[in-house]
Amino acid sequence: MDEPQSFGALLGEVLARDRALLGRKEELLAALEGRVSGAQVWAYRSLARAVRETNVAEAMLAADAQDAAGRKHAAEDAARTLRALGMQERAVHRVIDAIVEALDWEARAAEEDARTAAAAETAAAAEDAAGGAAAVEDAAETAAAKADVAEVEDAPPMTTQVVLVGTPYPAAFAPPVPAPPAAPVVWTCRCGHAGNRGKFCVICGLPRADGEVAAADVWTCVCGRAKNTGKFCVACGRSRADGDSRTHASLVWACACGRRGNKGNFCTACGRPRAESEVELWTCTCGHEGNTGRFCTACGRSRVEGGRR
């Protein structure tokens, strides 16, 4: 059975025809209304309230042309606006996550991160190559000067020192071998983004000194919320001891209707029994967790190409 389409993917299909539709509230809702089904209804209702009562959609559309840090700040500002409106935390995440997925921000941030890392590696290699060439030239000049001095001071009278062409440098004067460039340090930010290589997180902009956490400290809750870094899930409030999917994987299951975090014998959304509707969750090599179908909902890779488990 194919994975149910996420609301963010549905929104992305609508915006693919006209990205500016995100800023035209009623036209956007009208385009979505006839296509929403199943588990997408709750996300649609949350989005409808957000776009009618705030300007978060227009603000995130305006930030679409900014870099990764600017887009991250825009998403955080939008979340604060929705919380001030009185929306529950789960509804806030539905709205923000759907717009981020529809505008493809996570994939674009990963591409920008890869380009930045590649440019840094190229610059480091060029610098090391230039430094190594200069060191070899200096060492050769020094060795030649020392050989000349030693020949004058130490040679016996009337003795001619024959130097054969092609004789290698003595070991003491051999040119130093340039050290290989150090491998770039990859670190995980407490916002949940892994794979940072520079001094700042490419998603939230935090400096490494303030934001770095161990990869083992980033966890996914049984409710389906990924990239938690604290003691409690930011979506449902469960403590890590009760909700970490790595330690409670056998107790929770995902339904084919799209509902995750079920603990009993029946799905809490559609009511189907676990024996008939349970689907396996898998993590893509792009870092997106909780996929249930044959393709990753974040990058589109097939499970054969991108599945890690």
Image (spheres, grey):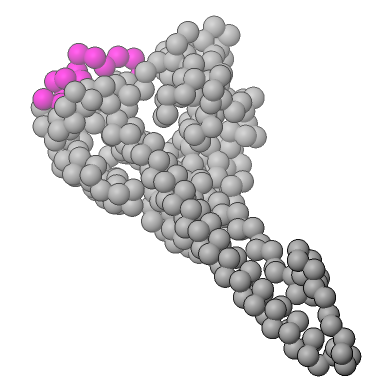
Q: Give the x, y percent position of residue 80.
A: 28, 49
Q: In which quarter of the image is residue 160?
A: bottom right
Which residue occupies the foreground of this view, 100 or 224?
100
Determine whether, in the image, residue 296 is placed left or right of residue 73: right
Closer to us: 240 or 195: 195
The one nearer the camera, 177 or 145, is: 145
Decide if residue 35 is on the left or right side of residue 220.
left
Tell me, yes or no, if residue 85 can be seen here: no
Q: How many labels does the image show?
A: 0
Decide: is 81 above or below 302: below
Asked if the stretch drawn in magenta spans residue 31, the answer is yes
Magenta-drawn stretch contains 144: no
Please identify the residue farthest to the front as the structure is shown: 158
Q: Position of residue 162 (x, y in %)?
A: 82, 75
Relative height, residue 262 to residue 161 (above, below): above
Which residue is pictured at 77% across the width and 70% down the height? 169
Quadrant in the picture for the C terminus: top right
Q: Is residue 169 visible?
A: yes
Please provide percent x and percent y for residue 22: 17, 32
Q: Which of 111 and 61 is in front in this view?
A: 111
Q: In this view, does 187 lie above or below 220?
A: below
The residue depicted at 55 percent of the width and 61 percent of the height is 129
Image coordinates of residue 136 in percent, x first then y, are: 63, 69
Which residue sits at x=56%, y=25%?
Answer: 307
In this view, 141 is above or below 223:
below
Stretch of the chain drawn in magenta: 27-39
